[in-house]
Image (cartoon, rainbow, N blue to C red):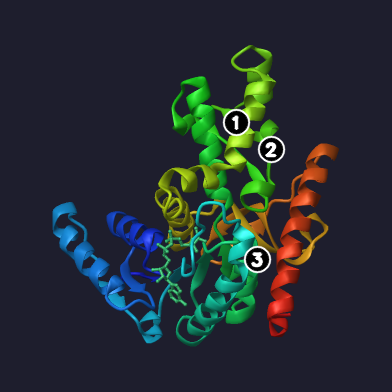
Amino acid sequence: MARSKIALIGAGQIGGTLALLAGLKELGDIVLFDVVEGTPQGKALDLAELAPVEGFDAKLLGTNAYEHLAGADVVIVTAGVPRKPGMSRDDLLAVNLKVMEQAGAGIAKYAPDAFVICITNPLDAMVWALQKASGLPRQKVVGMAGVLDSARLRFFLADEFNVSVEDVTAFVLGGHGDSMVPLVRYCTVAGIPVPDLIRIGWTSQDRIDAIIARTRNGGAEVVELLKTGSAFYAPAASAIAMAESYLKDKKRVLPVAAALSGEYGLKDLYVGVPAVIGARGVERVVELELDRGERAQFDQSVAAVQGLVDACLKIAPDLG
Ligand code: APR
């Protein structure tokens, strides 16, 4: 069987890490695309020279031409401008919207059968714009946010309890970052829900509240420390988990930004929800029953996403 092909639009910090992880996991051949001349070519060559050391086989190509996306099975989009300290995700909207229009056109022309994962921020609006601009089926275009937000939450919880990160699960709904909705009752240590761990004295509600606040602020915390650029290792690993579930038809249940068609009472909007990711893309959205508090937070998150989409429509009415 021929190798799968993974195309990366954007060969910056996340793009390079995506290529490294895709290589190490032998997910397939890799194309790095960027508008900057030399960057994708240099990273592709560097990674090709790493392959013999790590012992993986993959063709690596760096390019400035969309035509090299041809036949890609997975396209991961990180192209755009990252957040700088003090800059909100929303400030990025206008610049990155243009980039999504270009990427969408390239994908439509050269990789219309691909599973597309968007990482560019503001995520929930950019993935919406990318689907509109590419015209690909909605179940084949998803946004990466929830896997990262829940990974951050899992790490903080594992640290709090001094247990393996492997045994901690966490679930988040809604928009990325500030407006995410953590479902603490579905966060567990080896299946034991966090509220039960509070009851047996492993932690307190106050400490969990602080962990949730830190998770919401997780992206900004890294930005403040790095001073230039934003997080890239964990975002790349999160998108690779989604790509792997699609390529291997693993049908993992992952929190992703998916286009809703009536679930949670919403239509034509991308919102973070648990979904089954398999060979058909988003195969099923898990529609949970939310309690009143969760629903209120979810509605607030949805309103924030809708606000971003409305702002996109003002700038680019054609996408509607
Ligand atoms: N087409 C293709 N690539 C582009 C375009 C474009 N129109 N515009 C910018 N790029 C490229 C840049 O040249 C750069 O190499 O996108 C890359 C982005 O990489 P970084 O600046 O290193 O950003 P990164 O840390 O990888 O984050 C990527 O993810 O976290 C989000 O919003 C954040 O936009 C950011 C994205």
Residue 183: assigned label: 2
Left or right, residue 211 beside residue 174: left
Badge 3 crowding class, 10 Å Cα cut-off, few under 14, some 14 to 19, many 20 or more, is many
Left or right, residue 304 beside residue 23: right
Q: Is the Cβ of the residue at disc 1 closer than 8 Å to that at disc 2?
A: no
Q: Quadrant of ligand 1?
A: bottom left
Ranked by sequence position, the earlier of labels 1 and 2 is 2
Position in image of residue 177 (x %, y %): 61, 48
Q: Outermost residue toward the top?
A: 201
Residue type, mark 2 in image: Leu
Q: Outermost residue toward the right?
A: 292
Vertically, is 64 above or below 172?
A: below
**Quadrant assignment for the N terminus:** bottom left
Per the image, label 2 sits on a secondary structure element best described as loop
Residue type, mark 3 in image: Ala
Position in image of residue 77 (x %, y %): 48, 68
Ranked by sequence position, the earlier of labels 1 and 3 is 3
Q: Which residue is mark 3?
A: 125
Vertically, is 211 above or below 13?
A: above
Q: Nearer the viewer, residue 240 or 124?
A: 124
Residue at 67% of width from left, 22% of height from top?
Answer: 206
